[in-house]
Amino acid sequence: MAIRRILRMGHPHLRQRASDVPLEILGTEPFERLLADMKDTLHDYGGVGLAAPQIGEGLRTAIIELPGGPTRYGELEPIPLTTFINPVIEVLSEKTAGFWEGCLSVPGLRGFVERPQHVRVSYTDIQGLTQTLELQGFPATVVQHEFDHLDGTLYIDRITDTRRLAFEEEFNRHILTT
């Protein structure tokens, strides 16, 4: 459909709580166009997730697509392109781990964020059915990162030690190689 401009940190829309998606709009042409735009935008920008507020749409919707295989985060099981409508996260274990996160709305930076590593996500799918997904490790981090956007939160808000915030170029040069 269309590649949309991603809002960057500082845009007030990124700090607002998104509204619940009324289920009667599922399958409508405007909502289907939004989902297609989100997919095109995600692929064009090269991300693994995108929340509707990042493209200026205040709806509780996010998409995630994780390639499987070896990554700098270890061996990952793939998550095919999945649409999460009105998602709710339940933390199943308080055990946390940290990852260096980046964000399409905070380009050029990486920050170390610790998050719970075992969660259950309940959400509505594009057919209007309630789904549940249990995730651990990096995929659990990804859903929490994306769903934070639905509440007006950016990953930088969750950094507990600002010495662990770096420009990507410096991260690649000095941190990734250590």
Image (cartoon, grey):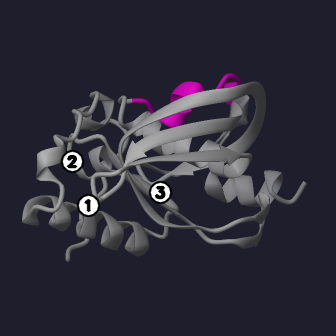
Q: Is residue 160 magenta?
A: yes
Marks 1/2: CA distance? 9 Å
Q: Left or right of 7: which side holds 69?
A: right
Residue placed most toward the observer, 148 or 164: 148
Q: Say which of marks 1 and 2 sits in front.
A: 2
The location of residue 144, given as percent across then percent down, is: 54, 38
The 10 Å Cα crowd at callout 2, few under 14, some 14 to 19, many 20 or more, is some
On the question of residue 64 being in view, the answer is yes
Q: Say which of marks 3 and 1 sits in front.
A: 3
Q: Which mark is residue 25?
A: none
Q: Which mark is residue 49?
A: 3
Of the numbered discs 2 and 3, the one sitting upstream in the chain is 3
The location of residue 63, given as percent across then percent down, is: 41, 57
Please give the name of the residue rendered at 35% of the width and 54% of the height, measured from the top-left corner: 125
The amino acid marked with disc number 1 is: Arg
Q: Are marks 1 and 2 in contact (CB under 8 Å)?
A: yes
Residue placed most toward the observer, 17 or 160: 17
Q: Left or right of 55: which side holds 25?
A: left
* Mark 1 lies on residue: 5
The location of residue 106, given as percent across then percent down, is: 46, 46
* Mark 2 lies on residue: 56
The amino acid marked with disc number 3 is: Gly
Q: Which residues are magenta?
A: 153-162
Screen quadrant of the N terminus:
bottom left
Q: Are marks 3 and 1 in contact (CB under 8 Å)?
A: no
Q: Quadrant of residue 88?
A: top left
Please give the name of the residue rendered at 18% of the width and 45% of the height, measured from the top-left corner: 23
Q: Quadrant of residue 22?
A: top left
Q: Is 72 rendered above or below residue 164? A: below
Q: Say which of marks 2 and 3 sits in front.
A: 3
